[in-house]
Image: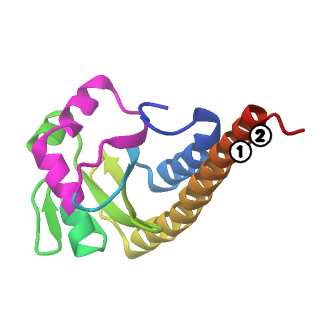
Amino acid sequence: LAQSSTADAAALEPVEVVLNQVQHLLGAATVLLYRGEASNTPIHDYIALDCPPTLRAALESPTWGALLHYTLAVDHVVLLQQDPGPEAATLPPALVALGYTGGLLCPIRLAPDGVGVLACLAMATRPWREDSVALVQTVTEILALALHTQQRYHTSQQTAAQQAQRVAQLGIQ
């Protein structure tokens, strides 16, 4: 777990397994899952696989943040390339300097108001085929459900703890 500001590491393990499988299937150098509360707020909470410190610094850039929000605004997969064509956005120079050659960003809608982006970054020049894009879209739907379930579980655990504390305070047995 590279960074996660709000999640329990044990609860994230299944999510990391899915991210690892996506990384393997796509041959991606790095896979990141970003989560936020609303599409108009910064998305700082992320889970990353194979994310060296130099990459973390590049991912804190305003350019990267703008790409995440652009992905949420257009609500479809955004391809990233060094030399963008009509169907791709420009890979940020900081990522190119680290050896990344392309990637894709896929929006995730989490109920009720949450958002996220699944980012896959590649270091080998490769076209992103339709089947790869479809796979990532399917995985984001599964991740959205898993993250929603995780949040509901976390909320129910908090509620149960609060109720137990209240019962203890009232002296009810």
Judged by depth in the image, the label closer to the viewer, 1 or 2, is: 2
**Residue closest to the eye, 164 or 136:** 164
Instruction: Residue at 18% x, 40% y: name it.
Output: 95
| Quadrant (top left/top right/bottom left/bottom right) for the C terminus | top right
The answer to whether residue 29 is visible is: no
Give the side of residue 10 with respect to residue 132, left or right: right
Instruction: Residue at 9% x, 42% y: name it.
Output: 93
Q: Give the color scheme: rainbow, by chain, secondary structure or one colour.
A: rainbow
Instruction: Using a 10 Å C-alpha cutoff, classify the residue at mark 2 as few (fewer than 14 neighbours), some (14 to 19) or many (20 or more).
Output: few
Give the side of residue 84 with respect to residue 148, left or right: left
Instruction: Using a 10 Å C-alpha cutoff, classify the residue at mark 1 as few (fewer than 14 neighbours), some (14 to 19) or many (20 or more).
Output: few
Which amino acid type is shown beneath numbered disc 2? Val
Q: Position of residue 125 (x, y in %)?
A: 26, 52
Give the residue at the far front of this rendering: 170
Instruction: Residue at 45% x, 73% y: name it.
Output: 134
Answer above or below: position of 62 versus 111: above
Q: Position of residue 130 (x, y in %)?
A: 38, 75
Answer above or below: position of 68 versus 57: below
Q: Position of residue 100 (x, y in %)?
A: 23, 42
Q: Which residue is mark 1?
A: 163
Q: What span is in magenta?
A: 41-69
**Residue closest to the eye, 117 or 98:** 117
Which secondary structure, mark 1? helix
- How far is mark 1 from mark 2, CA to CA? 6 Å
Q: Disc 1, disc 2: CB below 8 Å?
A: yes
**Residue closest to the eye, 90 or 123:** 90
**Residue closest to the eye, 156 or 118:** 156
Which mark identifies residue 137?
A: none
Q: Which residue is mark 2?
A: 167
Which secondary structure, mark 2? helix
